[in-house]
């Protein structure tokens, strides 16, 4: 990292992006203050305490190929709590469950004909050789998949995966999303058996968040929890000069927002209106994700994809087929996610209605499933989860440097064409930190000149 004179830098948002930024900037000697609205760090990577152990509110994946994440895990001192596991996935189709993990599983997948299985393999291979993200961005995902895989494979395999990720919005997304996923997942396979390797941290994803926060505090970072930002103050010269909270205005030399674009738009009334409108136009999928604490396992897979569109949840994710159950006191953790398009009626369902509907379909899928095996059922929700990037709209992705001088942005809409995950988020954080440090060489301090 560049060697710069210490500046006062504010970071808004304490998720993986925010805490990684704070760590990198403080490591370079900057004076960092981090603001988080919630009562704990982590954002979507926060946790619940259950039976004396931390459990992730939402499931998260660390792949064996995620080197940025693994570097942070090593540097923050928690590498001894990182474990690698060979995972499996399956498909639920027409009342039957089929393995879908290895090349042999693809070749034997009964819902497809032999020729369709060949075309599915061709799609996976083709994705590894396609390097042009620009071409993928202007190609509708269905067109690309049908061209190579055929309509039958699209209907049985790709369409359910798209429904799982994008709800009703899959019709307008570019091929980038499946292309990037195939490239990412194939990077985790090891050896002649082509086993998919994933990682997990004991005591949850928050283990890394907590370790980075401890490093930040050693480096002098000030962390404010339960602190809502009312406004990013822009001075008469058009420069981001401070943060307004309920306690008043605090001046800073630079401000970095990790908030979702529409939320940042609400905090910058003094910014150029076209930029505010650009942020407001960015749409996000939400998620409705019940978590079952079970007494026993219900599937042998980490992920069971679902082709039946009458089932409201789009996958069964049993994370204790990745995590050793002894690390969660031998509970079994099952997530039943449903990504929600903006305005989805399901977002308004009360928890009791979600539980009743979800369990009805779970019993239909698994005749031996018993509610008596459920220890707890929690409904987790989040409004802003996955940025939607329609075809050929990369010009709408925010740049790190905003039109407001010394206001920077780092959010998940900016990782495209990469997938939105911890790995891409931490890489973005490093890129933004480098930009701020490089720019900081030319700054004169503004912290004493702010008009409150």
Image (cartoon, helix red, strand yellow):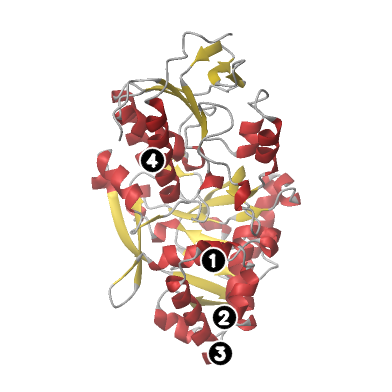
Instruction: Judge whether residue 157 can be spotted in this image.
Output: yes
For label 3, the residue is 113
Sooner in the amino-acid sequence: mark 1 or mark 3: 3
Nearer the observer, disc 4 or disc 1? 4
Q: Answer few, some or many: residues within 10 Å of disc 3's Cα (few below 14, many 20 plus, some between 14 and 19).
A: some
* Mark carried by residue 178: 1
**Would residue 201 be visible to someone looking at this image?**
no
Whole-angstrom CA distance, mark 3 to mark 2, is 12 Å
Where does the image place residue 97, in percent across and percent down from the top left?
A: 53, 76
The residue carrying mark 2 is 149
Q: Secondary structure at mark 1?
A: helix
Q: Position of residue 100 (x, y in %)?
A: 47, 75
Query: Closest to the observer: 237 or 261?
Result: 237
Dot 1 or dot 2: first in sequence order is 2
Which one is earlier in the sequence, the residue at label 3 or at label 2?
A: 3
Q: Which mark is residue 430?
A: 4
Label ID, residue 328 = none
Q: CA distance from mark 4 to mark 2?
A: 37 Å
SS for dot 3: loop
**Residue 19: which quarter of the image?**
top left
Q: Secondary structure at mark 2?
A: helix
Left of 156 or right of it: where is 117?
A: left
Q: Position of residue 343 (x, y in %)?
A: 75, 48
Q: CA distance from mark 3 to mark 4?
A: 46 Å
Q: Disc 4 or disc 2, which is closer to the eye?
A: 4
**In the image, residue 15 above or below residue 325:** above
The residue positioned 66% from the left and 56% from the top of the image is 390
Circles 3 and 2 in contact, beta carbons < 8 Å: no
Query: Mark 3 or mark 2, which is nearer to you?
Result: 2
């Amino acid at each position: 990292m560049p060697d710069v004179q210490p500046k006062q830098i504010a970071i808004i948002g304490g998720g993986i992006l925010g805490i990684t930024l704070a760590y990198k900037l403080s490591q370079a000697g900057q004076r960092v203050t981090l603001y988080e609205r919630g009562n704990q760090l982590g954002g979507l990577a926060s946790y619940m305490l259950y039976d004396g152990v931390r459990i992730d509110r939402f499931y998260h994946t660390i792949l064996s190929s995620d080197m940025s994440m693994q570097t942070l895990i090593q540097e923050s001192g928690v590498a001894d709590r990182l474990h690698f596991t060979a995972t499996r996935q399956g498909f639920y189709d027409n009342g039957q469950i089929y393995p879908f993990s290895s090349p042999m599983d693809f070749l034997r997948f009964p819902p497809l004909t032999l020729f369709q299985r060949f075309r599915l393999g061709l799609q996976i291979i083709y994705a590894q050789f396609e390097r042009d993200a620009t071409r993928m961005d202007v190609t509708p995902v269905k067109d690309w998949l049908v061209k190579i895989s055929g309509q039958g494979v699209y209907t049985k395999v790709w369409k359910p995966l798209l429904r799982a990720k994008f709800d009703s919005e899959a019709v307008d997304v570019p091929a980038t999303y499946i292309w990037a996923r195939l490239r990412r997942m194939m990077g985790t396979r090891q050896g002649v058996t082509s086993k998919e390797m994933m990682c997990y941290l004991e005591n949850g994803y928050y283990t890394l968040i907590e370790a980075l926060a401890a490093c930040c505090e050693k480096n002098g970072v000030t962390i404010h929890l339960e602190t809502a930002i009312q406004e990013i103050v822009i001075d008469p010269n058009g420069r981001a000069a401070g943060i307004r909270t309920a306690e008043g205005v605090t001046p800073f030399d630079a401000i970095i927002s990790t908030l979702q674009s529409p939320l940042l738009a609400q905090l910058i009334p003094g910014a150029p209106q076209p930029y505010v409108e650009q942020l407001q136009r960015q749409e996000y999928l939400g998620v409705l994700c019940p978590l079952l604490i079970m007494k026993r396992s219900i599937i042998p897979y980490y992920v069971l994809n679902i082709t039946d569109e009458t089932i409201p949840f789009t996958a069964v994710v049993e994370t204790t087929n990745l995590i050793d159950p002894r690390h969660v006191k031998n509970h079994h953790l099952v997530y039943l996610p449903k990504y929600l398009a903006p305005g989805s009626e399901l977002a308004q369902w009360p928890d009791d209605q979600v539980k009743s509907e979800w369990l009805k379909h779970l019993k239909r899928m698994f005749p031996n499933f018993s509610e008596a095996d459920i220890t707890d059922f929690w409904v987790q929700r989040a409004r802003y989860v996955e940025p939607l990037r329609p075809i050929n709209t990369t010009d709408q992705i925010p740049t790190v440097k905003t039109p407001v001088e010394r206001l920077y942005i780092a959010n998940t809409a900016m990782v495209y064409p990469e997938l939105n995950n911890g790995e891409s988020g931490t890489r973005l954080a490093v890129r933004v930190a480098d930009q701020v440090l490089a720019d900081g060489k030319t700054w004169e301090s503004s912290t004493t000149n702010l008009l409150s």
